[in-house]
Structure formats: structure tokens, C-alpha cells
């Protein structure tokens, strides 16, 4: 519980550190190219303004981001909001409604509902 509170305080005070928190959770030292499947140490192609790195495969020369294959990939919602939403969901005693999630994060009810409904936020499709 104390780790969650520490992460939450850090996210609220410095939203730009969200990518560092995600990197520490993933800890991929060797990356597999999602295009060709070769396991090599890819070279860093560039870093965007949010701090997300783009890698280039040495074998097929295709590029991919470090968030490829996660729920954060191609999301318009900032990473700090995603992590705060995950922490709210983990600490919820029962279930977490989309309205409550939207109010606590300051996003619209529709955005919170779509993320839950699409199976991108802890709800599995049956």
C-alpha cells in the first residue's frame, strides 16, 4: 500500500515520470522485434517529447516503440492518467464504476467507460 501511495504522489507532482515508472515495471533488457521476431539488442532510433523511445531492429530495419503490445500503445490518454487509474482500480474495495474513475482522474465519463468496455482496463471480454 505504501508503494502505491509513493507512486501516486510522484505521478501527481511529476506526471512526466510515468514513462520511467513503466520502464521499471517492464524491465526489458533484451527486446524482441514485433515485426520479424528476432531477439537482438535494438538500437534507439529516437525519443519523442513524452520520453517514449523508438527502437530500430538491426535485422529487418523496422521501427517499434517501447510501449508496443501494451495497453498504453497508441492511447491518447497520458501515461500518468493510465497509471493513476490502475492504482485506483487496484485499491478499489469492490468494483470501480466508470463515473467514479472519471471523477477521480478528471476525465470524461465516456472516456473512462470506453476504456473499461473495450477490455483495456482490467475487464475481460467474454
Image: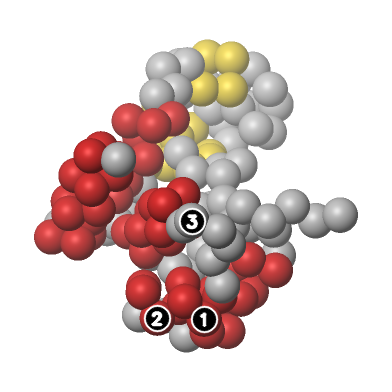
Disc number for residue 93? 3
From this viewpoint, which residue is outermost toward the right?
126
Q: Earlier in the sequence, mark 3 or mark 1?
A: 3
Up/down of 111 relative to 125, above or below: below
Circle 1: is it few (<14), some (14-19), or many (20+) Cα within 10 Å?
A: some
Q: Quadrant of residue 120?
A: bottom right
Q: Can I make out residue 15 in this image?
A: yes
Q: Can I make out residue 47 in this image?
A: no
Q: Marks 3/1: CA distance?
A: 16 Å
Disc number for residue 108? none
Q: Marks 1/2: CA distance?
A: 6 Å
Disc number for residue 99? 1
Q: Secondary structure at mark 3?
A: loop
Up/down of 123 relative to 108, above or below: above
Front position among marks 2 and 3: 3
Give the residue drawn at x 17%, y 54%: 9
Amino acid at each position: 500500500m505504501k508503494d502505491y501511495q509513493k507512486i501516486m504522489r510522484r505521478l501527481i507532482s511529476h506526471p512526466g515520470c510515468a514513462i520511467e515508472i513503466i520502464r521499471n515495471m517492464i524491465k526489458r533488457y533484451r527486446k524482441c522485434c514485433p515485426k520479424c521476431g528476432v531477439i537482438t539488442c535494438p538500437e534507439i532510433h529516437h525519443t519523442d517529447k513524452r520520453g517514449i523511445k523508438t527502437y530500430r531492429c538491426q535485422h529487418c530495419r523496422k521501427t517499434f516503440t517501447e510501449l508496443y503490445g501494451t495497453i498504453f500503445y497508441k492511447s491518447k490518454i497520458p501515461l500518468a492518467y493510465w497509471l493513476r487509474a490502475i492504482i485506483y482500480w487496484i485499491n478499489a474495495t469492490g468494483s470501480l464504476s466508470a463515473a467514479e474513475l472519471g471523477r477521480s482522474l478528471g476525465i470524461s465519463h465516456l472516456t473512462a467507460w470506453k476504456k473499461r468496455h473495450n477490455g483495456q482496463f482490467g475487464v475481460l471480454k467474454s
